[in-house]
Image (cartoon, rainbow, N blue to C red):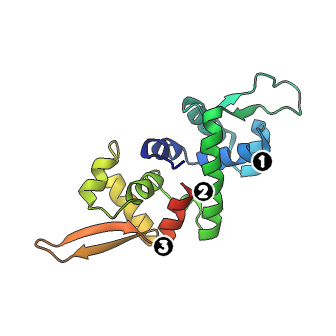
Amino acid sequence: MMVQLDDAMRLSGSRWAVPVLASLAETDGARGAELTHRLGITRTSLARSIEHLTDCGWIARNSDHGHPLRPEYVLTEAGAAVAGHARKLRAAYDRLGLTLEDLSRWSLPIVVALRPKAQRFSELKAELGPATPRAVSLAIKQMIATSLVDRSIVDDFPPTPLYGLTRRGKELAKAL
């Protein structure tokens, strides 16, 4: 199963969504204190991420929580499928030497949108719906700088720039 564009947008809606989902998948759930320690994030950032992931329907509070050894947060059935992709994404980040700072909110949706073929900016922007042109432009520039996307010019009148995935970008797309 491949991640669709709307899931990629929801997955990138929180900076820590991928690491939190991957961590929950590896440990069959976790307590909040465990996650903050393991991921090195603040409680506030974790709370925002958990709220976002709960709204997406991917994690839930464990109804059996109360004992110190029972996890506080667990993956839902829908979350388990997405968490598998989150684990692959985190492994791809490590292989490619990417950090969370290297990717913007729109990076994953852009990778999904460019997965089938290279596109013009206007086509890409139309696919990404709620993203502003500035947000898409900044994300593309950042992705060009990290060698995930390349820009080529089609010799036409007028010349047309096309954006496509590089080898590194395709490797990231495979994780999705």
Query: What's the mark number on residue 37?
Result: 1
Query: Between disc 1 and disc 3, whose residue precedes?
Result: 1
**Which three-letter amino acid code belongs to the residue tagged 3?**
Arg
Residue behind mark 3? 167
In the displayed image of the protein, which residue is found farthest to the front?
1
Query: Between disc 1 and disc 2, whose residue precedes?
Result: 1
Residue behind mark 2? 89
Using the image as rendered, state which of residue 6 and residue 50 is in the foreground: 6
- Callout 2: few (<14), some (14-19), or many (20+) C-alpha neighbours within 10 Å? many
**Which three-letter amino acid code belongs to the residue tagged 2?**
Leu
Q: Residue at x 53, y 44 (%)?
A: 11
Query: What's the mark number on residue 173?
Result: none
> Left or right: 44 with respect to 62?
left
Q: Residue at x 33, y 59 (%)?
A: 137
Q: Quadrant of residue 50?
A: top right
> Left or right: 173 with respect to 76?
left
Between the residue at mark 2 and the residue at mark 3, the CA separation in whole angstroms equals: 15 Å
Q: Residue at x 16, y 73 (%)?
A: 159
Badge 1 vs badge 2, beta-carbon distance below 8 Å? no
Callout 2 secondary element = helix
Query: Between disc 2 and disc 3, whose residue precedes?
Result: 2
- Callout 3: few (<14), some (14-19), or many (20+) C-alpha neighbours within 10 Å? few
Q: Is residue 133 visible?
A: no
